[in-house]
Image (cartoon, rainbow, N blue to C red):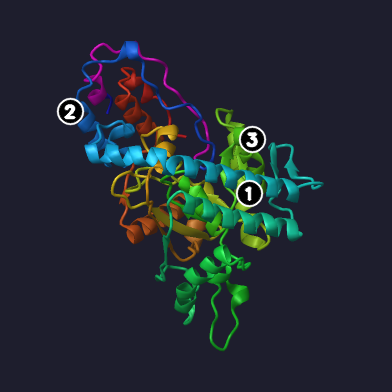
């Protein structure tokens, strides 16, 4: 790879010391260093269109193929310009105001429900949340969070989300003669729980009723929801579907409005760019939370993106093992965003540009495929890498996604090439954490 990149940089700078990291593979700590920015005074004229095409073949998991082009900066056809102009003066201001109102309303609800309540604190790991709060306060936070998340998706153009539930034969899966009927009824239950206010537990749709024998005590609750990662919109969907806890960088807890909401979600905060002991500590917190969710139905479910970064929605990157260290069953979910004009994947486009185009899109589409809970074998429990690999293979087969062996480091290289940065070889030394 480095040889190809040298052709784009005839006079590379002196090589730097390789970046090394002792971070645990299972850690959910992510690199907070920004993707390489363009440097006008260092743009290399040798970075030709042919070179970019070669990189797109190699880094296909991060390539955009919509009408807006790479990084959302492509030349738009006349029709697209007209539609965008109409959307800017109509859809954009309306959606922006409504989205802000929804965010403020939910913040107020969370603030009222957490008044005079002490958060659950872990001083050693610097974690703080309200997810373990019980009673009517927790019920209001969860119900309102799910409803308002779906309402926000509706405001953003997701008028209908296609959800499907696969009933497939899995190794080590606890099956029953009536399970297929439970999966058929799952979509209706989820719809009722979100729109009609019924308090339907997310695990209720997975309970299997056996004829003549009650085996509900034998069924294991999943410890985490595992999903592919395409966009920040993934979080809104999962909030509306099951209101789980996520992994977020620690600075999120200090953001206006969003900070309190993340604490009510029970987010596990990560201090990026820290030493390895901190990373192992966070991985331990995640493992503990997954085990807790698995053993206690009142505990918040964990939602994890084992790929560690976003793709264009057509590929599935290698899984980190952090979600599988607890050896608890996991619930795989596959998200897709069909499109005609603008791809909702947050891959090689800036956040601000992505939000702007999202608000200007008249209709947006989302598909969610819920697979059965995956119960690990003893061999998979003993080997988290095997467990992660098998779950990834299952998700690939059921969604027809393409397996890719690249990750965040390659994503940095591709972004740097698009920005015309001539220090690409140095990026090769950045380890994908």
Instruction: Residue under label 3, please give it.
Output: 256
Mark 3 vs 2, N-terminal side: 2
Tell me which residue sits at (64%, 35%) in the image: 256
Q: Which residue is found at the position 41% from the left and 32% from the top?
A: 350
- Compared to 392, does 81 lie above or below? above
The answer to the question of whether label 1 and label 2 lie on touching residues, with beta carbons closer than 8 A, is no
- Indicate left or right for 41 with 160 as reference: left
N-terminal label among 1 and 2: 2
**Label 3 secondary element:** loop
Label 3 with label 2: CB-CB less than 8 Å: no
Q: Residues within 10 Å of mark 1 (few under 14, many from 20)?
A: many
Q: Which residues are magenta?
A: 3-25
User: Vertical placement of 281 versus 9: above or below?
Assistant: below
- As drawn, the residue found furthest toward the left would be 50
Give the CA distance from mark 1 to mark 2. 46 Å
Residue drawn at (82%, 46%) of the image: 116
Q: Which mark is residue 50?
A: 2
- SS at mark 2 in the image: helix
Q: CA distance from mark 3 to mark 2?
A: 45 Å
The dominant secondary structure in magenta is loop
**Front residue of 242 and 277:** 242
24 over 113 or under it: above or below:
above
Say which residue label 1 marks.
265
The reply to whether the magenta stretch includes residue 150 is: no
Q: Quadrant of residue 333?
A: bottom left
Q: Is residue 5 visible?
A: yes
Closer to us: mark 3 or mark 2?
3
Residue 300 visible in image? no
Is residue 22 one of those drawn in magenta?
yes
Give how far across and how far down residue 337 sits, in percent: 37, 51
Please state the horizontal and vertical placement of residue 102, each as a whole percent of the image. 58, 47
Which is nearer the eye, 33 or 45? 45
């Amino acid at each position: 790879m480095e040889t190809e990149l040298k052709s784009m940089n005839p006079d590379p700078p002196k090589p730097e010391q390789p970046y090394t990291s002792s971070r645990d593979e299972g850690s959910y700590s992510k690199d907070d260093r920004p993707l390489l920015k363009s440097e006008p005074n260092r743009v290399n004229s040798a970075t030709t269109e042919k070179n970019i095409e070669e990189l797109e073949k190699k880094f296909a998991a991060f390539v955009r193929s919509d009408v807006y082009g790479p990084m959302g900066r492509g030349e738009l056809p006349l029709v697209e310009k007209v539609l965008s102009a109409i959307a800017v003066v109509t859809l954009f201001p309306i959606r922006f105001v409504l989205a802000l109102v929804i965010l403020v309303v939910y913040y107020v609800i969370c603030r009222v429900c957490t008044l005079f309540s002490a958060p659950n604190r872990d001083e050693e790991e610097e974690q703080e949340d309200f997810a373990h709060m019980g009673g009517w306060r927790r019920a209001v936070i969860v119900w309102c969070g799910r409803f308002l998340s779906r309402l926000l998706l509706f405001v953003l153009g997701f008028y209908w989300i296609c959800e499907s539930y696969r009933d497939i034969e899995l190794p080590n899966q606890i099956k029953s003669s009536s399970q297929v009927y439970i999966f058929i009824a799952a979509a209706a239950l989820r719809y009722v729980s979100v729109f009609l206010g019924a308090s339907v537990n997310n695990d209720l749709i997975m309970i299997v009723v056996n004829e003549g024998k009650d085996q509900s005590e034998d069924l294991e609750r999943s410890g985490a929801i595992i999903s592919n990662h395409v966009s920040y919109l993934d979080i809104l969907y999962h909030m509306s579907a099951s209101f789980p806890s996520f992994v977020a960088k620690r600075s999120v807890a200090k953001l206006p409005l969003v900070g309190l909401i993340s604490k009510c979600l029970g987010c596990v905060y990560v201090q990026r760019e820290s030493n390895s002991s901190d990373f192992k500590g966070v991985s331990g917190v995640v493992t503990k939370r997954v085990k807790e969710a698995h053993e206690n139905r009142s505990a918040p479910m964990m939602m994890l993106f084992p790929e560690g970064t976003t793709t264009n929605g057509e590929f599935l990157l290698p899984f980190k093992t952090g979600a599988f260290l607890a050896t608890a069953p996991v619930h795989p979910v596959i998200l897709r965003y069909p499109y005609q004009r603008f791809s909702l994947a947050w891959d090689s486009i800036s956040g601000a540009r992505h939000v702007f185009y999202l608000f200007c899109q008249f209709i947006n589409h989302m598909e969610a495929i819920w697979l059965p809970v995956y119960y690990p074998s003893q061999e998979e429990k003993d080997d988290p890498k095997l467990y992660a690999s098998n779950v990834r293979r299952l998700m690939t087969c059921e969604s027809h996604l393409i397996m890719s062996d690249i990750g965040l480091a390659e994503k940095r290289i591709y972004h740097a090439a698009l920005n015309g940065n001539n220090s690409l070889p140095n990026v090769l030394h950045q380890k994908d954490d």
